[in-house]
Image (cartoon, rainbow, N blue to C red):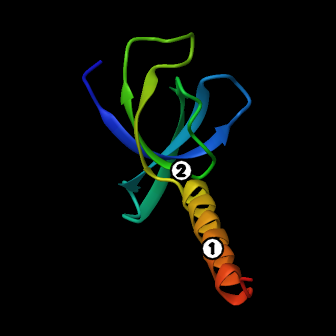
Amino acid sequence: MPPMALRGIVTKVGFMQKTATVTVSRWMEHNVTGKKIERTKKYLTHDPNNELRQDDVVIIRNCPPVSARKRFKLERVIKSPEAQRQLRRAQLEVQQQQQQALQSPQP
């Protein structure tokens, strides 16, 4: 199989160890009507560190078979909404602690 990298969204994670399901979408034109149609395909992807979370946007690359149905490995995470949400929440907690420290009188 020639080397190929696909961009997709993680749709299922946590059911199998070191495995995530990535949905890759592509647009094609219908032969008769000429309308654009979205086609999707799901790939089982090897995630050695279990770092993927649902709704992450990732790039996967084909590799030699890891198991019976896994033919792709995680190359990199482009965007992770859950990680960004946790980072923002931690920043807000730090800001609140700093404001409380400034407001409380020190003896």
Circle 2 crowding by C-alpha within 10 Å: few under 14, some 14–19, many from 20: some
Q: Is residue 26 above or below residue 85?
A: above
Q: Are marks 2 and 1 in contact (CB under 8 Å)?
A: no
Examine the image and state in which quarter residue 20 appears.
top right
Circle 1 crowding by C-alpha within 10 Å: few under 14, some 14–19, many from 20: few
Discs 2/1, front: 1
Mark number, residue 56: 2
Q: Label 2, secondary structure: give it.
A: loop
Left or right: 74 as drawn, with respect to 86: left
Left or right: 102 as drawn, with respect to 39: right
Which part of the image, by quadrant, shows the C terminus? bottom right
Q: Residue at x 52, y 54 (%)?
A: 80
- Tell me residue 11's x, y (percent): 62, 45
- Tell me residue 96's x, y (percent): 67, 78
How many marks the image carries: the answer is 2
Q: Is residue 57 above or below residue 75?
A: below
Seen as rendered, the residue at the extreme left is 2
Q: Residue at x 66, y 40 (%)?
A: 12
- Tell me residue 104's x, y (percent): 74, 86
Q: Is residue 69 above or below residue 99?
A: above
Q: Residue at x 63, y 73 (%)?
A: 92
Nearest the viewer among 26 and 74 is 74
Residue under pointer 1:
92
Q: Amino acid at mark 2?
A: Asp
Nearest the viewer among 102 and 6 is 102
Q: Amino acid at mark 1?
A: Leu
Mark number, residue 34: none
Q: Is residue 64 above or below residue 77?
A: above
